[in-house]
Amino acid sequence: MRLPCPTFPARVSGFTGTLRAAIVNLARACRAEGEGFIPPNHDSDEPAALSLRWTRVWVLLATGGGLGYSPVASGTFGTLPGLLIVAATWHLGLTVQIVACIILAVAAVPLCEIAEDYFGKKDDGRIVADEFMTFPISMVGLPLHPLVLALAFLTNRIFDILKPPPARELQALHGGFGIVIDDVFAAFYSLVANHLVYGWLVAHKIV
């Protein structure tokens, strides 16, 4: 009897499950300690302090170096590091672009889950790793041109805000996967729009 093929969410969950569980447990322990609870079997404060420092590093990354704390349009400001990622890697070719997008999207899942657990709120607005780590998808196969970058940034933000199906429905999924997957689909919508507009710009010799 043929066994059913696992769904895409199940594959991603299995791929990141071990890493996610280990780091999330670390974040929970550090958060509890920050509230005054000292986990058992701590012989000194040194391991706890080290764990707390690492948790702060993960949260700093998840908030885009603090851009997620912006009082207005945190998602827009939080997408800006994605431009730097594209600028640093796009000259390496299409294959590297695709591999980089996959690695970034998968890595964003546990990172966002750590931050969600730290802040204690579902898809907290301060979490922007899902924004900037999926933005490069919007640029796959496109040239590193200022006008194209601006176009990709604009359409990425529009589709992330509108969340056309199935992005909005997928956002309700649990944990880091639910935080990231809607941005992945928004980035794919943006990618399609960008290629269409870029084709028009080339046809009219604007770029």
Image (cartoon, rainbow, N blue to C red):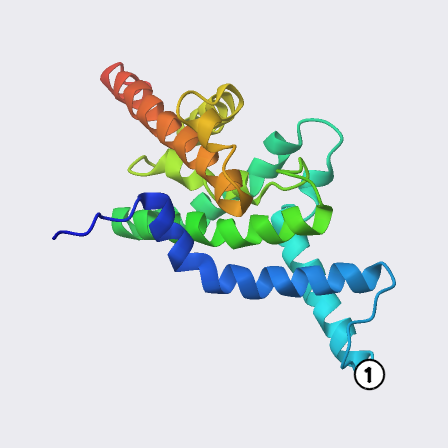
Question: Can you give x and y, in whole percent of width and height, for residue 4 in the image?
Answer: 21, 47
Q: Residue furthest bottom?
A: 43
Q: Is residue 193 above or below residue 110?
A: above
At a point 27% along the width and 46% down the height, the residue shown is: 94
Q: Is residue 107 above or below residue 47?
A: above
Q: Quadrant location of the C terminus?
A: top left
| Residue 110 seen in this snapshot | yes
Question: What residue does disc 1 label?
Answer: 44
Question: Can you give x and y, in whole percent of width and height, for residue 164 in the image?
Answer: 43, 20
Q: Is residue 121 above or below residue 151?
A: below
Residue 158 vs residue 187: left or right?
A: right
Res 23 quadrant in image = bottom right
Please tell me which residue lies in front, 204 or 16: 16
Please tell me which residue lies in front, 171 or 67: 171
| Residue 102 seen in this snapshot | no
Binning the other alpha carbons within 10 Å of mark 1 as few (below 14), some (14 to 19) or many (20 upward) gives: few
Please tell me which residue lies in front, 13 or 167: 13
Question: Can you give x and y, in whole percent of width and height, for residue 106 in the image?
Answer: 43, 51
Question: Can you give x and y, in whole percent of width and height, for residue 204 in the image?
Answer: 26, 14
Residue 114 vs residue 173: left or right?
A: right
Residue 44 vs residue 80: left or right?
A: right
At a point 44% along the width and 44% down the height, the residue shown is: 86
At a point 34% along the width and 52% down the height, the residue shown is: 11
Type of amino acid at the residue the image marks with label 1 = Ser
Q: Is residue 80 above or below residue 88?
A: above
Secondary structure at numbered mark 1: loop
At a point 72% along the width and 46% down the height, the residue shown is: 119
